Image (cartoon, grey):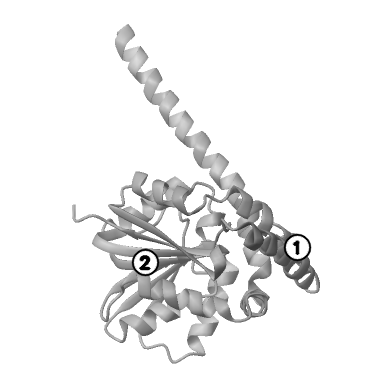
């Protein structure tokens, strides 16, 4: 083998090694988050109702509306958790549509299936155990997508957005709901007080103090709306708009894939 060939081979090997290193790092970071969601799965919905005073249902319905899913569509609910947002999508797409709920927590998916069996959901919902950074779906498969409280928890936000972009059809929209740091200082103070004084102590009653104490630090690291819009455009989306809701303590990032 010539020296040039040796150098090229070395570069390829180094590249593969770097990629494998990133994969291992992402997996290591994701493991405790996955375990966390497995642990909170049995009371996840109940706590969501209590902690948001039921408002999360309204916010999720807003995400469905912003996703622009239509009757007969095939839609993705990424990081679907216990499946309530997926069922909202199903009611929108109707009996001729199909919804795929994807999550990396087996415990959450099991509860999602139980909830589905107890419901009168009009559309087919398939539950898929999947990594948001390596989705097991073909390119341009979905007409619309939602993601509720998942983007903040992925270990690589740009890569997750790229994967979401890949599996959406041209001109499709996705609506991504999550916590947000409000610009208003009074709302910032309220959010910090609420998380530390209400959320964590309530979770502690169920033996889940550590599981919910992660909210504040995860929010501190989470990009604000303008940064999310930038990352979405970098991932390939032709349009990206962030809508602050609940006084800016929550937000919905709405992205559109170009026509290609």
Write down the quadrant of residue 249 in the picture.
Answer: bottom right
Query: How many other residues sit within 10 Å of disc 2, few (<14), some (14-19) or many (≥20)?
Result: many
**In front here: 171 or 132?**
171
Residue 17 image offset from top left, x and y in percent: 47, 29
**In front here: 19 or 237?**
237
Element at badge 1?
helix
Residue 68 image offset from top left, x and y in percent: 31, 72
Which disc is residue 196 wearing? 1
> Circle 2 sits on which residue?
145
**In front here: 231 or 104?**
231
**In front here: 60 or 33?**
60
Element at badge 2?
strand
Write down the quadrant of residue 101 in the picture.
Answer: bottom left
Instruction: Please name the residue shown 36% across and 66% down the image.
Output: 145
Cα separation between marks 2 and 1: 32 Å
On-image quarter of the N terminus: top left
Query: How many other residues sit within 10 Å of disc 1, few (<14), some (14-19) or many (≥20)?
Result: some
Q: Residue furthest left?
A: 260
**Is residue 210 positioned above or below 88 on the image?**
above
Instruction: Please name the residue shown 43% across and 46% down the image.
Output: 158
Q: Nearer the viewer, mark 2 or mark 1?
A: 1
Q: Residue furthest bottom?
A: 120
Q: Is residue 81 visible?
A: yes
Q: Is residue 133 visible?
A: no
Residue 119 horizontal side relative to residue 201, left or right: left
First reached walking from the N terminus: tag 2 or tag 1: 2
Instruction: Please name the residue shown 27% across and 63% down the image.
Output: 172
**Is residue 98 positioned above or below 130 on the image?**
below
């Amino acid at each position: 083998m010539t020296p040039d060939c040796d150098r090229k081979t070395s570069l390829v090997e180094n590249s593969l090694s770097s990629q494998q290193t990133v994969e291992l790092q992402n997996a290591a970071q994701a493991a405790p988050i996955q375990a966390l969601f497995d642990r909170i799965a049995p009371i996840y919905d109940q706590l969501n109702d209590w902690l948001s005073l039921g408002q999360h249902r309204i916010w999720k319905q807003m995400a469905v509306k912003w996703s622009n899913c239509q009757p007969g569509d095939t839609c993705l609910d990424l990081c679907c958790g216990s499946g309530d947002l997926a069922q909202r999508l199903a009611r929108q797409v109707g009996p001729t549509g199909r919804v795929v709920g994807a999550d990396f927590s087996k415990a959450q998916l099991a509860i999602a299936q139980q909830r589905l069996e107890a419901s009168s959901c009009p559309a087919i919902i398939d539950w898929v155990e999947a990594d948001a950074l390596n989705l097991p779906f073909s390119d341009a498969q979905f007409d619309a997508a939602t993601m509720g409280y998942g983007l903040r928890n992925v270990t690589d936000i740009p890569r997750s957005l790229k994967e979401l972009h890949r599996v959406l059809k041209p001109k499709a929209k996705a609506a991504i709901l999550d916590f947000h740091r409000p610009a208003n200082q009074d709302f910032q103070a309220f959010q910090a007080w609420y998380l530390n004084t209400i959320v964590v102590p309530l979770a502690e009653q169920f033996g889940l103090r550590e599981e919910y104490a992660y909210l504040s630090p995860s929010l501190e690291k989470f990009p604000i709306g303008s940064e999310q819009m930038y990352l979405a455009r970098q991932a390939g989306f032709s349009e990206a708009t962030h809508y602050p809701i609940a006084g800016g303590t929550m937000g919905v990032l709405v992205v559109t894939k170009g026509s290609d």
